[in-house]
Image (cartoon, rainbow, N blue to C red):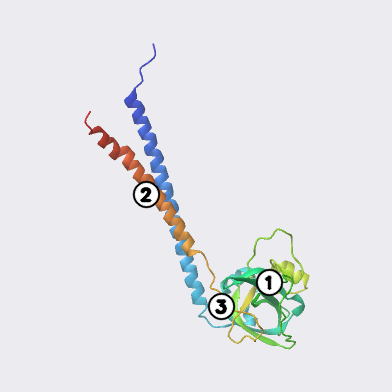
C-alpha cells in the first residue's frame, strides 16, 4: 500500500519555496537598482567636477601633466600652448561624426616651445569626400610658431576595427605610445582639443560636443531593476495572497 500524499504539507513547502525565491529576487533587483542610482550619483558628481574645472584658471604649457594620473586631474581644463606643428605626423581619424555627418578628426602633434615634449592636438573635424574616400582635406602651411587655445582631454577615443595597428594618413584609431614611437616624439599623456575661439580659418569645424559620461544610462538601468522588483512583488501578492482568497470565497 502506498503512503497517502500529505497535500497540505506539500502545499506549504511549495509556498515556502515561492516565498524564498521571491524575497531573494526582490532583494537582488532592489539592490541592483540602488547600485545603479549610486553610480548615477557618482557620474553627476564627476560631471559637476568637470564643469568646475572648465572655470578654473588657464593651465600654461609648462604645467601640463607628465603622467597619466596627473593628466586625468587636468581633463577639461582650459590651456594655451605654443609651439610648431609636426605636419608629417598629421593623421585623419576616420568614421568620426560631427553634427551627425561622417568625416575625419584631424590630429597633429605640436612640438612645444621651450620644451623637448610634444602634445597631441585635436585640431578639428573635416567632412569625408563622397567620391573619394582616400582624399583628405588640405591644411594651410604654418611653418612658424603657432598658439593653440583649447581644453585638455584624453587622447581620441577608440572605435572598433577589424584590422591590426593602422598606418598612413587615414586611420581608424590612434594609440598614443605607438604613435609616439612611430614619429620619434615625446608626447604628453593627454591631448588638447582646439577651440573655435582664436582658431585659424583652416576649413575645419570645431563644434565639439560636451562629453557624455552616461548619467542617463544608469537612471535607465535603475528603472528597469526597480520595475522588475515591483513586478515580482506584485505577482507574489496576487497569486499567493489575493487570488487564493478570492477563489476560496467563490460559491461551490
Task: Residue at the far bottom: name it.
Answer: 144
108 vs 174: above or below: below
- Which residue is painted at 38% across and 45% down in the image? 232
The image quarter in which residue 104 lies: bottom right
The image quarter in which residue 20 lies: top left
Disc 2 target residue: 230
Disc 1 target residue: 130
Comes first in the chain, label 2 or label 3: 3
Q: Residue 77: which numbered mark, if any?
A: 3
Looking at the rendered image, the quarter that the C terminus falls into is: top left
**Residue at mark 2 to residue at mark 1: CA–CA distance:** 51 Å
Comes first in the chain, label 2 or label 1: 1
Which label sits in the foreground, 2 or 3?
A: 2
- Which residue is painted at 56% across and 77% down in the image? 77
Locate residue 75, reporting x and y percent: 57, 73
Secondary structure at badge 2 equals helix
**Residue at mark 3 to residue at mark 1: CA–CA distance:** 36 Å
168 vs 116: above or below: above
In screen coordinates, is 152 left or right of 11?
Answer: right
Locate residue 89, reporting x and y percent: 75, 75
Secondary structure at badge 3 equals loop
For the residue carrying disc 2, how many other residues have a C-alpha within 10 Å: few (<14), some (14-19), or many (20+)? some
**Residue at mark 2 to residue at mark 3: CA–CA distance:** 43 Å
The answer to whether mark 2 and mark 1 are in CB contact below 8 A is no
Amino acid at each position: 500500500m502506498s503512503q497517502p500524499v500529505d497535500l497540505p504539507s506539500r502545499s506549504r513547502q511549495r509556498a515556502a519555496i515561492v516565498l524564498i525565491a521571491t524575497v531573494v529576487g526582490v532583494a537582488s533587483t532592489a539592490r541592483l537598482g540602488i547600485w545603479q542610482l549610486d553610480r548615477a550619483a557618482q557620474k553627476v558628481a564627476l560631471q559637476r567636477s568637470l564643469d568646475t574645472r572648465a572655470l578654473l584658471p588657464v593651465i600654461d604649457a609648462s604645467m601640463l601633466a607628465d603622467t597619466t594620473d596627473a593628466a586625468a586631474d587636468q581633463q577639461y581644463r582650459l590651456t594655451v600652448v605654443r609651439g610648431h606643428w609636426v605636419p608629417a605626423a598629421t593623421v585623419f581619424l576616420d568614421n568620426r561624426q560631427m553634427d551627425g555627418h561622417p568625416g575625419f578628426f584631424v590630429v597633429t602633434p605640436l612640438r612645444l616651445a621651450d620644451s623637448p615634449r610634444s602634445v597631441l592636438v585635436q585640431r578639428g573635424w573635416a567632412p569625408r569626400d563622397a567620391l573619394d574616400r582616400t582624399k583628405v582635406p588640405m591644411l594651410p602651411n604654418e611653418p612658424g610658431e603657432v598658439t593653440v587655445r583649447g581644453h585638455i582631454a584624453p587622447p581620441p577615443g577608440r572605435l572598433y576595427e577589424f584590422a591590426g595597428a593602422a598606418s598612413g594618413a587615414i586611420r581608424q584609431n590612434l594609440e598614443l605610445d605607438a604613435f609616439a614611437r612611430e614619429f620619434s616624439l615625446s608626447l604628453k599623456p593627454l591631448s588638447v582639443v582646439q577651440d573655435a575661439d582664436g582658431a585659424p580659418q583652416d576649413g575645419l569645424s570645431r563644434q565639439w560636443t560636451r562629453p557624455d559620461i552616461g548619467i542617463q544610462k544608469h537612471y535607465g538601468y535603475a528603472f528597469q531593476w526597480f520595475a522588475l522588483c515591483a513586478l515580482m512583488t506584485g505577482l507574489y501578492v496576487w497569486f499567493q495572497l489575493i487570488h487564493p482568497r478570492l477563489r476560496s470565497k467563490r460559491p461551490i
